[in-house]
Amino acid sequence: MDKERTLYEKIINSKITPVLLLLLTIDLFFNHIPEHIQERFDIFLAIFGGAITLFLSVWAIETIAPVLFDKIPTITALFCISTLFIFGIMLISKTSSFHSGQLKDNGVLTEAILVKKTKIYGKGFKRAYHMKVRFMTEDNKDSYAKILLSRWEYERFDEGEKIPIYYSSEHPNIARIAHDKLKPEEPDFLDF
């Protein structure tokens, strides 16, 4: 029992352990979680992975160079916090490029029905808009996708309306509005 405990303590107290765990975490999130899963849960994975990265970066600095927290605590803390944001931005950037690549390489044009529009209120005047659409895939499967919208798109489309979209034949939950196929809006001369 003492032998196991000392081995455990040696592993935990080793200077290489937090660095190794940090590298394994980055490898796991960027190379082993399938991209379509990353795309679907991008915000959650970015926050979760960023939090793990933050914890491991604090542990690594505390283990390797604890004097940094004593000599320059603000800069060291800002560095550790920045790892959370860097991880999140890089993961979201990767999923965004996967999203675009899927639509470029496997995009299929179809017509979807707008099932539901959602507006999320943030701080101040910030808003996020998205819609859920239902459509039939090439192999006649009923499918749904969530599409992010700009404010004017949110105001332009109504629930129940048919909208041209491109969806990925490999991952039908990845879709976007087919702007090149939209009918131009007719001007409403009564609105000033």
Image (cartoon, rainbow, N blue to C red):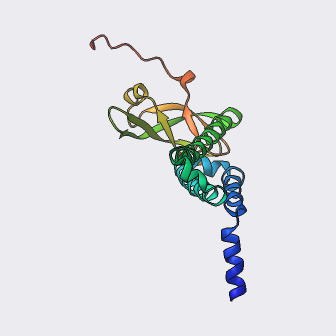
Residue 168's x, y, as percent? 64, 40
State left or right for residue 108 relative to residue 46.
right
Q: Quadrant of the N terminus?
A: bottom right
Q: Along the line of sight, which residue is nearer the eye, 161 or 73?
A: 73
Residue 13 versus residue 85 in the image, above or below: below
Could you say where residue 136 lies in the image, as x and y percent from the top left? 57, 43
Residue at the image point whose x is 72% and y is 51% from the top: 31
Residue at point 30%, 10% (across, down): 189
Residue 109: percent from the left, percent from the top?
61, 32
Residue nearest the observer in this picture, 142 or 41: 41
**On the image, which quarter does residue 192 sit in?**
top left
Tell how many labels.
Answer: 0
Taking the image as shown, residue 184 lies to the left or right of residue 50, namely left
| Quarter of the figure with residue 117 | top left
Residue 69 visible, this orientation: yes
Compared with residue 176, is residue 1 higher up or lower down, i.e. above or below? below
In front: 105, or 64?
64
* Rendered residue at 68%/60% (across/down): 21
Q: Extreme bottom residue here? A: 1
Residue 82 location in percent, x, y? 56, 44
Residue 142 in sight: no
Outermost residue on the front side: it is 71
Q: Residue 125 vs residue 110: left or right?
A: left
Write the residue at 72% across / 61% down: 16
